[in-house]
Image: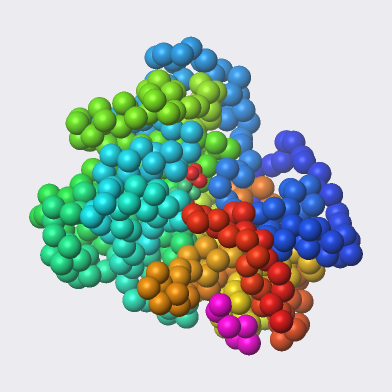
């Protein structure tokens, strides 16, 4: 088989500033060992997130020039609406400035004290928006989804028995909505099967609970269904995506992922009454319902991006890039979450650095070292992001997984960039026994990973 090449040519370039190890040692220390607090100019390969970091196409940039900036009823809104409607068939499509704005509006209406919102795994902003409104977020992913070594084609699936038990235990009246994150970002970018989406939809229908998708990576999820789920091998990813949306009553979407843009999102739904309430909140905090906090040009870029993302040559190259990284890591013996998911490699920090106890954040130790050695920015997805303290006992409650996510911006880096990343990981892995643990010197009450400060724990 021949190398699967990037299915695009480069028309514009952005230079990368090289730094030395001495410079990086100083930079990371000054940033309180928090990679979020390092300036982008001091990063060589930025794998912090795949969110809003895509390279836009010539046609998207052409759309930017055609943006209609009218306050109400702009042509660009209609182009955006038509594209999202063709794909999702949801009746109400409300643009928002990004995914969390859609979440905030939805949960301001639906999540309050005494309400429970189940999902496979809530993403961090989703969970934060539910908790901010005093609701309770529950993660009901299948057991395989919690085991980094377990091989399962759809590790992002929700446990349908657990979901039904959960509904009966908490009471239907206390569950205003059920979500599924596709692909399951916090669970390792793992896909959810069509069967599981359909099953979730059936349970929700049985109990009269609205079923919403967190659809950020719907195209990557569709590609996995095509590759892995019997009966879908001959369907196009577009047909698969349409079928996925057909089972849901609405969705939240960060266009910064699978719409290939740098900003934007939307909230969509069929329910008229909920849409009315959502638009009322939107007008107060985001903007008029035909722009929702975005410029007309942003809506054009989203409309075009939603077409390009379902190009199967693109999806093939995209998923193959992640798989290639996994194959090379296997050869080095580096532990990572298996099988590889859609948008990132997740190093398994507990297996990588078993000498660091979870309360000293092994994921953070690896992330800091990847920066020191190679100027690579990754993201800890473990105790710093999701760890909790028991309010009664004061005991630290670690999450199931301690991961370091290397997320791949779409259409940005080439194979040689990824080969360099592999070389750096190999060096860090060879010297893993010397990695120190970390402890907080500052933490905020919500989403603490963004602003936290650390020191080396001896
Ligand atoms: C990124 C993301 C969000 C939040 O979207 P933003 O555009 O960053 O606000 C929500 N859910 C998932 C699964 C995501 O990946």
Q: Which residues are magenta?
A: 354-359
Counting from the top left corner in percent of width and height, residue 348 is at: 56, 76
Q: Tell which of 62 and 262 is nearer to you.
A: 262
- Residue 23 visible in the current orientation: yes
The quadrant of the rendering that contains the N terminus is bottom right
Residue 118 belongs to the span the image colors magenta: no
Dominant secondary structure of the magenta stretch? loop
Q: Residue at x 83, y 65 (%)?
A: 25
Q: Is residue 281 left or right of residue 202?
A: right
Counting from the top left corner in percent of width and height, residue 195 is at: 25, 61
Colour mode? rainbow
Counting from the top left corner in percent of width and height, residue 18 is at: 86, 54
- Residue 193 visible in the current orientation: no
Q: Residue at x 51, y 21 (%)?
A: 296
Q: Residue at x 48, y 65 (%)?
A: 386
Counting from the top left corner in percent of width and height, residue 138 is at: 31, 62
Q: Is residue 65 above or below residue 452?
A: above
Label tally: 0
Residue 357 belongs to the span the image colors magenta: yes
């Amino acid at each position: 088989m021949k190398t699967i090449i990037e299915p695009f040519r480069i028309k514009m370039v952005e230079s990368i500033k090289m730094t030395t190890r001495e410079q990086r040692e100083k930079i990371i220390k000054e940033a309180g060992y928090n990679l979020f607090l390092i300036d982008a100019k001091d990063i060589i390969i930025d794998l912090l997130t795949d969110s809003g970091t895509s390279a836009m196409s010539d046609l998207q940039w052409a759309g930017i020039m055609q943006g209609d900036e009218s306050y109400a009823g702009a042509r660009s809104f209609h182009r955006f609406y038509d594209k999202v409607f063709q794909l999702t068939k949801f009746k109400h499509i409300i643009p928002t400035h990004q995914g969390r704005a859609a979440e905030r509006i939805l949960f301001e209406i639906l999540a309050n004290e005494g309400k429970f919102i189940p999902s496979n795994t809530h993403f961090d902003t989703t969970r934060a928006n539910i908790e901010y409104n005093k609701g309770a977020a529950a993660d009901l992913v299948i057991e395989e989804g919690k085991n980094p070594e377990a091989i399962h084609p759809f590790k992002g699936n929700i446990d349908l028995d657990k979901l039904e038990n959960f509904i009966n235990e908490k009471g239907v009246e206390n569950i205003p909505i059920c979500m599924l994150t596709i692909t399951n970002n916090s669970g390792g970018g793992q896909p959810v099967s069509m069967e599981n989406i359909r099953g979730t939809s059936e349970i929700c229908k049985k109990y009269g609970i609205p079923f919403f998708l967190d659809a950020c990576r719907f195209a990557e999820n569709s590609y996995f269904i095509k590759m892995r789920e019997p009966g879908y091998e001959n369907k196009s990813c577009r047909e698969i995506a349409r079928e996925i949306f057909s089972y849901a009553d609405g969705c939240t979407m960060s266009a910064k992922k699978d719409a290939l843009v740098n900003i934007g999102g939307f909230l969509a739904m069929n329910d008229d009454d909920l849409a009315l309430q959502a638009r009322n909140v939107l007008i107060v905090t985001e903007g008029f319902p035909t722009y929702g906090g975005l410029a007309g040009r942003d809506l054009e870029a989203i409309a075009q991006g939603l077409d390009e993302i379902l190009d199967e040559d693109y999806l093939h190259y995209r998923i193959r890039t992640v798989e290639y990284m996994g194959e090379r890591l296997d050869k080095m013996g580096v532990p990572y979450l298996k099988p590889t998911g859609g948008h990132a490699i997740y190093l398994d920090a507990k297996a990588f650095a078993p000498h660091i106890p979870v309360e000293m954040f092994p994921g953070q130790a690896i992330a800091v070292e990847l920066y020191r050695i190679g100027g690579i920015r990754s993201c800890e997805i473990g105790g710093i992001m999701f760890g909790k303290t028991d309010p009664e006992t004061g005991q630290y409650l670690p999450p199931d997984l301690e991961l370091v996510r290397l997320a791949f911006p779409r259409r940005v880096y080439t194979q040689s960039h990824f080969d360099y990343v592999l070389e750096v990981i190999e060096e860090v892995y060879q010297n893993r026994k010397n990695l120190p643990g970390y402890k907080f010197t500052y933490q905020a009450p919500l989403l603490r990973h963004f602003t936290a400060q650390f020191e080396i724990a001896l």
